[in-house]
Image (cartoon, rainbow, N blue to C red):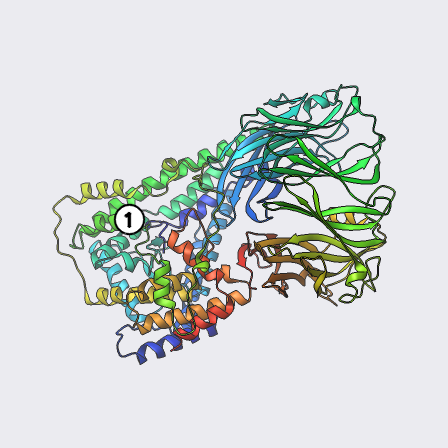
């Protein structure tokens, strides 16, 4: 893992700096090994303190709370060990500046921490210990700094209202409540229909939990509006970011057979139509998850409801002026390429290659993209030879994937290793 | 990149998944059956899974079925209530399923599984265009009965049992009434074709014990069909239920249910026959198989196996056009096999498949074995010319599997899955992939050193590759997959590392 990471860094740094045409500078990850150690140390201390201060009225509840914290903390350490967090001083200073802006202007004295993860989807989360994690992929969606500050304010809102802690505690209380204990006894004593009764009861608890969570999302939005307002930034940001997130689920570009011909036909390599032929599936209709009544279980209320709520709280005197700082602009400009590198680092070679191809079809002279394609393809060839390609390239999914993505996956799978080698040679600098 | 979530308050997910353990245990089901949904070319189109969710009354269970597509994506699922036999003396272990696909309809047979015995057959049809599952139905007392009232009393067994039903390729739903019972006044053996509204289209009575003077009784097994013709194999038997060394094939008009012709296998005073594969083309019907010295009950003689046969018939008239035999002696120039199908130090040849290619060539899949102790050895792939002569032999050496203190006929070795040949996939009319399991030689820990053999036949060339499923940190299992692919299931030793299910394209 360490070697792979180092190689990537050296490779990208050398290639990208060698290219005078491109102004793209990948994030310097040379200190990532040290950063990983430091982060692990920092959070070890933080988690020890949290675990030590768990207070509960009964030992049974305490044990459940400990168990949940343990699960969360183990998962967080996994992320640290997998180099999920980006450690770069300038980026950290910039994001921490925005975090402090919200905290200081709202006189919040508690200890908060901000981290940037390599995840490619437009997301952010609060871990419940004062840490706000921003996914790098959020920068692909953000248009200005104000939107980012609103997202940070939302996550601070969750922490400020102690949502994680209260959720864990109420879960522990429910698990040990007389209601649950008696119900479990009652179900056990039944001769028939035990599983159905237990399932229905659990479902009911889940519905109640999800309803509470949706309320908490609204509460986080409300307090985010209050926090954000004090930053004196454009009040419209909460609305615009939610509008973008609402429509961010659809793929913006695609790759056709002609695109592949245009991009890949070179030297001895010729794209064949047969590589894209997908055998017709027997199934045409896919059910939605029947067990989940979407409206009852949705953790997050739909964006429109949230937008309306924010409009109501924020008032409608929106200005058009937005903040686009130099730092934000620099991250935003690099985000397209950097996201591809992050995907590569996270071993999503197929998606990194696919997204790079979509950009490359419009910019065939781009050396950065050419190199990203090259490194991804090399990994895909290795994986194909070892029969582990599906670890790095998703499988065809007629329910979730776009037609274009399924076409890409079919193409990659149908390529013989010798064909892959030909393409790699064509992208080798 | 698809974005699945909005601003995520992720920790709540952990809490949501942390179920209340006892309730969760009470509500969880168990897997009853997992079956591949295959098309006529033996290629995977999806998977059918059946779980027991709950016991809701005496002998009554709530089951859940799940359908996955060829890419392992969930298509649909549903709940159904089924009965399962339980008594003071014996309980059915589970409900087993069998599947037949006809265009967009999937016929599902549910049967109480007692281990060696299966009883209380009933059927449902899933329409994959709408994902709707029909009510159960059986064929009993000469009619299809929808929603039969199952009470599972032994005294009522005959009321609850269905005759065999299946989809015949290109034809549709066929009822095959194989057994007669004079006491119950069931004197006819027949095939009956029903349409999608369960209306009878035709009925073909192939034996009526009240009106026959013959001492030979028919035992029909389905071989192949298309929209024009149904081909059945008949291994004749005696009144007492034992088989004899006599075989015929029945060619039935698929539109009318009328017999076109019954073909008597030749030289039954000398030979026993087994049809391995049957193929129907635009104008011909091919019966491809294995013949041996005759035997008392007509099973191919494992230790006096003589070779292969190819009988070709005109599709319209069922008149025989070609009658070819290929004795093992005739291939001895290319393979060191004696006239009884024995290869030194390996065993006798067992024929798994005879696959007709577009240019009239045939690919034969064979594996050597010994009856006692049951031993399976190397595999051989033959390419036969259109004239039914040997063109090439491809040997696949593999680990010798031996089962001490055992004895079985090759048909039973096949039935119980003891051969190493697993499956084949038809990639195109002239391209096939063959899968076999193997174990590394000199391996101390066979579980961790499983090899998976893949033989490809493409451009007239056989090639072998071996997937090493050995890993120090996990166990890997294989599963049938869609055309050209293999499902690998990797279970990691590392605690909390989830099992990986990968759909991998075969490199060939």
| Residue B358 x, y percent position in the rendering | 59, 54
Along the horizontal axis of the image, is B15 left or right of B395? left
Q: Position of residue B153 (x, y in %)?
A: 71, 22
The quarter of the picture where residue A332 lies is: bottom left
Residue at 68% x, 60% y is: B385
**Could you tell me which chain the residue with mark 1 belongs to?**
A
Specify whether A39 is left or right of A319.
Answer: right
Q: Which residue is mark 1?
A: A247
Placement of the C terminus of chain A among the 4 image quadrants? bottom left
Q: Residues within 10 Å of mark 1 (few under 14, many from 20)?
A: few
Question: On the rendered structure, is B202 left or right of B347?
Answer: left
Which element carries disc 1, helix, strand or loop? helix
Q: Nearer the viewer, residue A217 or A277?
A: A277
Q: Height in image: A69 above or below A114?
A: above
Q: Position of residue B466 (x, y in %)?
A: 64, 65
Is the residue B237 above or below the residue A21 in the image?
A: above
Residue A116 visible in this rendered orientation of the protein: no
- Which quarter of the figure has residue A30? bottom left
Using the rendered image of the protein, determine whether residue A31 is visible from the camera's viewpoint: yes
Q: Residue B18: horizontal and vertical position, in percent?
A: 49, 45
Q: How many marks are shown on the rendered structure?
A: 1
Front position in the image: A223 or B385: B385
Q: Image quadrant of residue B376?
A: bottom right
Against B313, residue A72 (above or below) is below
Judge by depth and name the residue closer to the eye, B465 or B82. B465
């Amino acid at each position: 893992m360490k070697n792979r990471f180092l190689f990537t860094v050296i490779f990208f740094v050398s290639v990208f700096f060698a290219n005078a045409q491109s102004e793209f500078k990948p994030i310097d990850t040379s200190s990532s090994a040290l950063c990983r150690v430091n982060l692990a140390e920092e959070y070890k201390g933080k988690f020890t303190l949290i675990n030590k201060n768990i207070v509960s009225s009964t030992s049974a509840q305490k044990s459940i709370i400990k168990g949940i914290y343990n699960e969360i903390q183990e998962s967080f350490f996994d992320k640290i060990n997998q180099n999920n967090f980006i450690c770069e001083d300038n980026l950290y200073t910039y994001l921490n500046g925005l975090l402090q802006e919200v905290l200081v202007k709202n006189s919040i004295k508690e200890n908060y921490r901000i981290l940037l993860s390599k995840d490619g989807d437009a997301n952010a989360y609060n871990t419940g210990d004062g840490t706000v994690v921003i996914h790098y992929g959020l920068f692909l969606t953000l248009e200005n700094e104000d939107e980012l500050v609103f997202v940070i304010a939302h996550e601070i809102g969750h922490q400020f209202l102690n949502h994680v802690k209260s959720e864990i505690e109420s879960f522990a209380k429910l698990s040990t409540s007389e209601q649950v204990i008696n119900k479990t006894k009652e179900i056990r004593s039944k001769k028939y229909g035990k599983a159905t009764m237990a399932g229905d009861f659990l479902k009911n608890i889940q519905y109640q939990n999800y309803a509470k969570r949706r309320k908490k999302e609204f509460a986080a939005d409300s307090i985010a509006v209050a926090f954000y307002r004090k930053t004196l930034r454009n009040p419209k940001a909460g609305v615009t970011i939610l509008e973008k997130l609402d429509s961010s689920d659809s793929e913006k570009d695609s790759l056709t057979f002609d695109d592949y011909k245009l991009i890949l036909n070179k030297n001895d390599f010729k794209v064949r139509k047969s590589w894209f032929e997908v055998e017709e599936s027997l199934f045409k209709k896919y059910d939605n998850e029947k067990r989940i009544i979407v409206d009852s279980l949705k953790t997050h209320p739909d964006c429109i409801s949230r937008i309306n709520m924010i409009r109501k709280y924020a008032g409608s005197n929106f200005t058009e002026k937005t903040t686009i700082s130099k730092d934000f602009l620099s991250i935003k400009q690099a985000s397209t390429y950097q996201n591809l590198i992050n995907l590569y680092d996270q071993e999503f070679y197929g998606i990194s290659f696919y997204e790079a191809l979509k950009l490359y079809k419009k910019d065939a002279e781009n050396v950065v993209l050419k190199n990203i394609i090259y490194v991804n393809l090399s990994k895909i060839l290795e994986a194909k030879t070892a029969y582990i390609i599906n670890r790095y390239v998703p499988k065809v999914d007629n329910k979730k994937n776009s037609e274009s993505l399924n076409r890409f996956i079919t193409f990659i799978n149908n390529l013989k290793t010798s064909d892959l080698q030909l393409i790699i040679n064509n992208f080798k600098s | 990149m698809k974005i699945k979530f909005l601003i995520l308050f992720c920790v709540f997910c952990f809490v949501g998944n942390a179920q209340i353990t006892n309730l969760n245990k009470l509500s969880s089901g168990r897997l009853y059956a997992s079956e591949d949904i295959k098309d006529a070319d033996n290629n995977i189109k999806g998977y059918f899974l059946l779980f027991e969710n709950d016991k809701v009354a005496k002998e009554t269970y709530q089951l859940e079925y799940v359908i996955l597509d060829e890419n392992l994506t969930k298509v649909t699922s549903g709940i159904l209530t089924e009965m399962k036999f339980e008594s003071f003396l014996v309980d059915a272990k589970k409900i087993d399923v069998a599947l037949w696909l006809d265009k967009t309809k999937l016929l599902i047979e549910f049967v109480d599984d007692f281990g060696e015995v299966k009883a209380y057959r009933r059927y449902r049809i899933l329409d994959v265009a709408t994902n709707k599952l029909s009510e159960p139905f059986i064929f009993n007392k000469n009619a299809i009965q929808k929603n039969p009232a199952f009470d599972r009393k032994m005294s009522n067994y005959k009321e609850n049992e269905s005759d065999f039903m299946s989809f015949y390729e290109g034809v549709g739903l066929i009822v095959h009434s194989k057994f007669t019972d004079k006491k119950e006044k069931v004197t006819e053996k027949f095939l009956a074709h029903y349409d999608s509204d369960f209306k009878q289209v035709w009925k073909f009575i192939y034996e009526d014990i009240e009106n026959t003077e013959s001492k030979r009784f028919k035992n029909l097994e389905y071989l192949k069909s298309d929209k024009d013709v149904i081909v059945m194999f008949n291994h004749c038997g005696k009144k007492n239920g034992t088989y004899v060394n006599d075989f015929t094939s029945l060619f039935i008009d698929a539109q009318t249910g009328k017999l076109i012709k019954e073909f008597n296998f030749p030289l039954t005073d000398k030979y026993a026959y087994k049809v391995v594969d049957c193929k129907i083309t635009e104008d011909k019907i091919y019966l491809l198989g294995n013949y041996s010295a005759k035997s008392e009950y007509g099973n191919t003689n494992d230790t006096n196996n003589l070779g292969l046969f190819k009988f070709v018939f005109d599709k319209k008239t069922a008149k025989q056009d070609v009658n070819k035999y290929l004795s093992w002696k005739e291939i001895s120039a290319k393979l060191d096999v004696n006239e009884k199908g024995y290869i030194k130090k390996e065993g006798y040849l067992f024929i798994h498949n005879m696959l007709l290619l577009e240019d009239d060539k045939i690919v034969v899949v064979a594996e050597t074995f010994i009856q006692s102790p049951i031993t399976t050895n190397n595999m051989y792939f033959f390419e036969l010319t259109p004239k039914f002569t040997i063109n090439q032999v491809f040997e696949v050496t593999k680990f010798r599997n031996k089962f001490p203190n055992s004895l079985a006929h090759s048909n039973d070795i096949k039935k119980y899955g003891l051969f190493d040949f697993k499956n084949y996939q038809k990639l195109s009319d002239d391209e096939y992939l063959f899968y076999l399991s193997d174990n590394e030689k000199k391996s101390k820990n066979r579980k961790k050193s499983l090899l998976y053999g893949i033989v490809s036949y493409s451009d007239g060339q056989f090639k072998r590759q071996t997937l090493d499923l050995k890993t120090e940190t996990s166990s890997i299992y294989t599963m049938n997959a869609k055309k050209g692919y293999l499902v690998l299931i990797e279970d990691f030793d590392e605690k909390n590392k989830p099992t990986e299910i990968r759909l991998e394209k075969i490199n060939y």
